[in-house]
Amino acid sequence: MGIFEIILVVSLSCLGIREVTDEVDNGRIGYPIRKWFIDQEWIPLFFAKPIILCVTCMASFWGTIIYWSITYHFSTNFDFITDYTVYVKWVFCCLSASFINTLLWTARNKNIGTFN
């Protein structure tokens, strides 16, 4: 699987998670998870934002999980660990997905409107 396909998977996954946890009227199906993260005072925002609260930040957490899962799945052995280009692609993937997430979420809020 190519790097651009991975970026697309990461970006669409993050946008999907953010959309199903959005607050619309009483909240979407995943809103209780989002509300739980917001209501917990013992969870710092720098942990909660990449997991579920911020669509831009989500690319770092979910991008890492998805990228390394795909990289491991398509490798025949663990030789990819010693290849430095894998790490460069990982950073590129997360940064690119973060940029795409921001653009698409801003366009979504501009065209559909924010519900909060």
Image: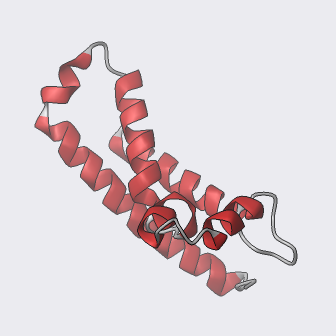
Q: Is residue 1 visible?
A: no
User: Which is more toward the observer, 6 or 65?
Assistant: 65
Say if 10 sits above or below 84 in the image: below
| Quadrant showing the C terminus | bottom right
Q: Is residue 2 visible?
A: yes
Residue at screen point 41% across, 23% down: 73
The x, y position of residue 59, in whole percent, is 43, 58
Residue at screen point 36% across, 38% down: 2
The x, y position of residue 35, in whole percent, is 70, 68
The x, y position of residue 103, in whole percent, is 48, 74
| Quadrant showing the N terminus | top left
User: Which is more toward the observer, 62 or 43?
Assistant: 43
Q: From the viewer's perspective, is 82 left or right of 51? A: left
The x, y position of residue 41, in whole percent, is 57, 72
- Rendering quarter of residue 86: top left
Residue at screen point 64% across, 76% down: 108
Q: From the viewer's perspective, is 116 left or right of 100? A: right
User: Which is more toward the observer, 77 or 31?
Assistant: 31
Residue at screen point 70% across, 85% down: 114
Display coloring: secondary structure
In the current view of this chain or complex, which residue is farthest to the right? 26
